[in-house]
C-alpha cells in the first residue's frame, strides 16, 4: 500500500492513498477529544463537532449540508475520547469542493448563538436516547469506573448541566486551546494525483495561522479495582468486567488484540460465544473488547442476560480466562486464531472510508502507516507463550473491575 505524506508550513499534515475508484474519501482529523476537557467543559468537544455545521462566514447551515449532497456526496463527523473527525465521501471530480467545504467548516465557522441553542436541544435528546439504551450506557459508565476522577473516563456527550453552560465564546476558546495545527491531519483515499492534492490543500489550508501544541495531556491516574451494582428500570441484566490494559504504543497491544479476538471477537466461533451462548443459552450477546489510547488501554467483556443467570455466566467467563492464563494454545488453535484476525484486518481495509480514517490515526500516533503485509507478519510472529503472558497480566481476576446493571425488582 503506497502512502504519500506532506506537511504545510503551519504544521497541518496531509496523508494520501491512491485508489482506482470513482468514489473518494477525504477528512480532517483533529487530535482532540473528550479527554482534553476540563470538568466544566465535559461534552465540549462533541458540542463543537455539532456546532461547526451551524454556519460559516460565507454559508448558512442549509448551504453547508447541501454543498456535497447536491452532487450525491455525504458529509459527516464524530467525536471520540482522543480525536474529532469531519469527513466526506464524494465522486472523485469533487475533491476541491470537499476540501474547501471541510476547511470552511473547521476553520471559518461563526458559531451563531441562536443556532447553538437549537443544537443543545438536539444533543440533550441524544443524551436521553443514550440513557434509554443500557447496553450502550454501561460501556461509558464502566469506563468512568475504571478511570475514576480522570477526564478520559467521562462521557463524550457530557452532562445536561455542562451542556446548558456552553456558548459561542466558550466553544471558540476551546478550539483555540485544542485545535492545534501540528495535530491536524487532512486524510485522503481516492483517485487523485498527490501533487494536485497538495496544491488543493495549500490553496485552502495554507492561510490557516499556525497554532502549535505546547502542553501535554493529563497523565493517567493510578488504577484501583472497583465493583458496582446499579438498579435500573430494565428487564434484562447487563454486566461488564475488565481491566486497564496496554496503550497503542505498547508492543504487547497486538498480542492482546489477538487474544481478545479469540476470546470474544465478532466471530461466532469465539470461545465465549461457543462456551456460553451456544452451549448454555445464557446470553444473546457476549463479547470481548479492547480499546487503545495514546497512554493507556481498556479491555473488557460485556454480556446481557437474565438476572438469575449473571453469576452463572460470570463463573463460566472466569473459567475461560483461567484456561487462557494456565494452558498454552496448541499450534492448530494458534494458527486458526491468527488467520482469523489477519482476515478480519484485510477485509476492514477494503472499506475505503475506514481506510481513510485508519491511516490518519496511525500517522498521528506513530508517524507511519503499517501495511497489511507488515501487520500480518507481526501477527504471525506472536507465540503461544506471548498470549499466555498477556493473559496472566490482563486477565488476572484480582485486577478485574465489575459493573452490573440489574432490574429494580428481582
Image: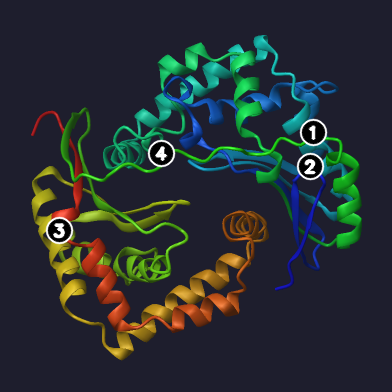
Question: From where the camera sits, is residue 374 visible?
Answer: yes
Taking the image as shown, residue 161 lies to the left or right of residue 309, namely right
Where is residue 337, by image quadrant? bottom left
> As rendered, which of 216 and 283 lies closer to the eye?
216
Q: Residue at x 35, y 29 (%)?
A: 132
Secondary structure under tag 2 reads loop
Q: Residue at x 85, y 55 (%)?
A: 92
Residue 230 at x, y percent in the picture: 18, 32
Dot 4 crowding, Cα within 10 Å, few <14, some 14–19, many 20+: many
Dot 1 crowding, Cα within 10 Å, few <14, some 14–19, many 20+: few
Marks 2/1 in contact by CB < 8 Å: the verdict is: yes
Secondary structure under tag 3 reads helix
**Label 3 sits on residue:** 397
Number of callouts: 4
| 2 or 1: tag closer to the N-terminus | 2
Above or below, 93 relative to 263: above
Label 4 or label 2, whichever lies nearer to me, is 2
**Label 1 sits on residue:** 209
> As rendered, which of 200 and 365 lies closer to the eye?
365
| 1 or 4: tag closer to the N-terminus | 4
**Label 4 sits on residue:** 152
Residue at the front extreme, as displayed:
214
Marks 1/3 in contact by CB < 8 Å: the verdict is: no
Residue 10, numbered circle: 2
Mark 3 → mark 4, Cα distance in angstroms: 24 Å
| 4 or 2: tag closer to the N-terminus | 2
| 2 or 3: tag closer to the N-terminus | 2
Mark 1 → mark 4, Cα distance in angstroms: 29 Å
Above or below, 277 relative to 180: below
Residue 232 at x, y percent in the picture: 21, 29
> As rendered, which of 288 and 178 lies closer to the eye?
178
Mark 4 → mark 2, Cα distance in angstroms: 29 Å
Amino acid at each position: 500500500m503506497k502512502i504519500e505524506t506532506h506537511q504545510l508550513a503551519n504544521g497541518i499534515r496531509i496523508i494520501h492513498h491512491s485508489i482506482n475508484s470513482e468514489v473518494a474519501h477525504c477528512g480532517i482529523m483533529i487530535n482532540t477529544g473528550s479527554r482534553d476537557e476540563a470538568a466544566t467543559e465535559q461534552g465540549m468537544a462533541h458540542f463543537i463537532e455539532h456546532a461547526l455545521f451551524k454556519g460559516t462566514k460565507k454559508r448558512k447551515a442549509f448551504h453547508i449540508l447541501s454543498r456535497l449532497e447536491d452532487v450525491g456526496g455525504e458529509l459527516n463527523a464524530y467525536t471520540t475520547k482522543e480525536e474529532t473527525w469531519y469527513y466526506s465521501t464524494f465522486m472523485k471530480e469533487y475533491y476541491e469542493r470537499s476540501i474547501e467545504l471541510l476547511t470552511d467548516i473547521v476553520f471559518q465557522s461563526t458559531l451563531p448563538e441562536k443556532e447553538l441553542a437549537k443544537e443543545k436541544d438536539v444533543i440533550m435528546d441524544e443524551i436521553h436516547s443514550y440513557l434509554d439504551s443500557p447496553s450502550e450506557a454501561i460501556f461509558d459508565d464502566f469506563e468512568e469506573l475504571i478511570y475514576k476522577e480522570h477526564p478520559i473516563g467521562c462521557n463524550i456527550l457530557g452532562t445536561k448541566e455542562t451542556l446548558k453552560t456552553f456558548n459561542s465564546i466558550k466553544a471558540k476558546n476551546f478550539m483555540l486551546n485544542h485545535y492545534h495545527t501540528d495535530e491536524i491531519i487532512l486524510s485522503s483515499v481516492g483517485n487523485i494525483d498527490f501533487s494536485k492534492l497538495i496544491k488543493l490543500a495549500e490553496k485552502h489550508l495554507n492561510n490557516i495561522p499556525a497554532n502549535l501544541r505546547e502542553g501535554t495531556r493529563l497523565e493517567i491516574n493510578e488504577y484501583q479495582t472497583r465493583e458496582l451494582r446499579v438498579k435500573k428500570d430494565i428487564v434484562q441484566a447487563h454486566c461488564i468486567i475488565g481491566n486497564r490494559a496496554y496503550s497503542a504504543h505498547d508492543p504487547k497491544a497486538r498480542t492482546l488484540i489477538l487474544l481478545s479476538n479469540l476470546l470474544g471477537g465478532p466471530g461466532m466461533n469465539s470461545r465465549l460465544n461457543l462456551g456460553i451462548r451456544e452451549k448454555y443459552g445464557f446470553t444473546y450477546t457476549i463479547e470481548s473488547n479492547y480499546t487503545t489510547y495514546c497512554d493507556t488501554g481498556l479491555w473488557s467483556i460485556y454480556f446481557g442476560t437474565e438476572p438469575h443467570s449473571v453469576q452463572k455466566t460470570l463463573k463460566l467467563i472466569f473459567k475461560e480466562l483461567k484456561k487462557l492464563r494456565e494452558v498454552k494454545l496448541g499450534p492448530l488453535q494458534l494458527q486458526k486464531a491468527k488467520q482469523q484476525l489477519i482476515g478480519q484486518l484485510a477485509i476492514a481495509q477494503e472499506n475505503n472510508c475506514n481506510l481513510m480514517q485508519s491511516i490518519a490515526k496511525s500517522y498521528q500516533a506513530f508517524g507511519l502507516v503499517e501495511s497489511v503485509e507488515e501487520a500480518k507478519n507481526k501477527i504471525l510472529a506472536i507465540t503461544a507463550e506471548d498470549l499466555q503472558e498477556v493473559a496472566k497480566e490482563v486477565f488476572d481476576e484480582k485486577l478485574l473491575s465489575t459493573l452490573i446493571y440489574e432490574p429494580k425488582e428481582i
